[in-house]
Image: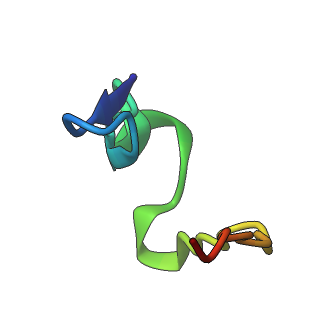
Amino acid sequence: MLDYDAEGRVVGIDIDHASQTVDLLRLELQAPQMAVERTVA
């Protein structure tokens, strides 16, 4: 389950029953590299 803010950005992730599926003591997350392009007016 993903939680979004008012602008549509992901601000939270819920994983049901995660402790039964994953070793939470060793859980590591990596965000994908993202390019941000802005137009200057």
**In the displayed image of the protein, which residue is found farthest to the front?**
41
In this view of the protein, which residue sits in the foreground, 8 or 17? 8
The image quarter in which residue 10 lies? top left
Q: Position of residue 39 (x, y in %)?
A: 67, 68
Q: How many marks?
A: 0
The answer to whether 4 appears left or right of 35 in the picture is: left
In this view of the protein, which residue sits in the foreground, 15 or 22? 15
Decide: is 12 above or below 32: above
Q: Position of residue 29 (x, y in %)?
A: 59, 70
Residue pictured at 53% horizontal, 69% vertical: 27
Which colour assignment does the render follow? rainbow
Decide: is 2 above or below 23: above
Q: Position of residue 30 (x, y in %)?
A: 67, 73
Residue pictured at 61% horizontal, 77% vertical: 40
Decide: is 2 above or below 30: above
The answer to whether 28 appears left or right of 24 in the picture is: right
In this view of the protein, which residue sits in the foreground, 5 or 21? 5
In this view of the protein, which residue sits in the foreground, 30 or 41? 41
Quadrant of the rendering where the C terminus is positioned? bottom right
**In the displayed image of the protein, which residue is found farthest to the left?**
6
The answer to whether 31 appears left or right of 35 in the picture is: left
Residue pictured at 51% horizontal, 60% vertical: 23
Residue pictured at 79% horizontal, 72% vertical: 35
Quadrant of the rendering where the N terminus is positioned? top left
Q: Position of residue 28 (x, y in %)?
A: 58, 75
